[in-house]
């Protein structure tokens, strides 16, 4: 019983690590301006309110002119948030 629970825990942690690496890879490609396949709002854990100071309007992937995101599909609200948030680079 304990061994089975341990196996499930190891599988869960491994899956989490793999997903985190995949998310970072997608974020890095978008940051470099490389073409990517956009993900759904659900997969991006999109929410219609900011997460603290993190909001789409100050994310480097957000385009205010057409309310789009380089990573997330669809109309994106400026005060929304997704797990792909990356603070806008200031020049």
Image (tube, helix red, strand yellow):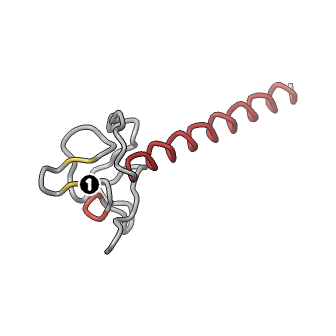
| Nearer to me, 24 or 57 | 24
* Residue 27 to residue 4: above or below: below
Residue located farthest toward the left when viewing the structure as drawn: 65
Query: Crowding at label 1, few (<14), some or many (≥20) Cα neighbours within 10 Å?
Result: many
Mark 1 residue element:
strand
The residue shown at (33%, 54%) is: 81
The residue shown at (34%, 45%) is: 46
- Left or right: residue 70 versus residue 77 is right
The residue shown at (43%, 49%) is: 83
Q: Position of residue 23 (x, y in %)?
A: 49, 43
Name the quadrant of the N terminus: top right
Residue located farthest toward the bottom when viewing the structure as drawn: 91
- Left or right: residue 65 versus residue 70 is left
Q: Position of residue 37 (x, y in %)?
A: 35, 33
Residue 20 appears in which quarter of the rendering?
top right
| Nearer to me, 15 or 27 | 27
- Left or right: residue 87 versus residue 6 is left
Q: Position of residue 44 (x, y in %)?
A: 39, 41
Q: Position of residue 80 (x, y in %)?
A: 28, 54
Residue 40 appears in which quarter of the rendering?
top left
- Label count reads 1
* Residue 35 to residue 62: above or below: above
Q: Which residue is mark 1?
A: 62
* Residue 2 to residue 22: above or below: above
Residue 62 appears in which quarter of the rendering?
bottom left
The residue shown at (32%, 59%) is: 60
* Residue 17 to residue 2: above or below: below
Name the quadrant of the C terminus: bottom left
């Amino acid at each position: 019983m304990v061994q089975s629970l341990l196996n499930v825990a190891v599988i869960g942690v491994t899956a989490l690590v793999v997903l985190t690496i995949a998310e970072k890879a997608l974020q890095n490609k978008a940051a470099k301006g490389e073409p990517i396949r956009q993900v759904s709002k659900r997969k991006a854990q999109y929410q219609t309110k900011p997460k603290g100071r993190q909001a789409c309007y100050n994310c480097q992937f957000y385009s205010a002119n057409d309310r789009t995101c380089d990573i997330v599909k669809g109309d994106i609200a400026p005060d929304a948030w997704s797990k792909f948030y990356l603070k806008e680079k200031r020049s």
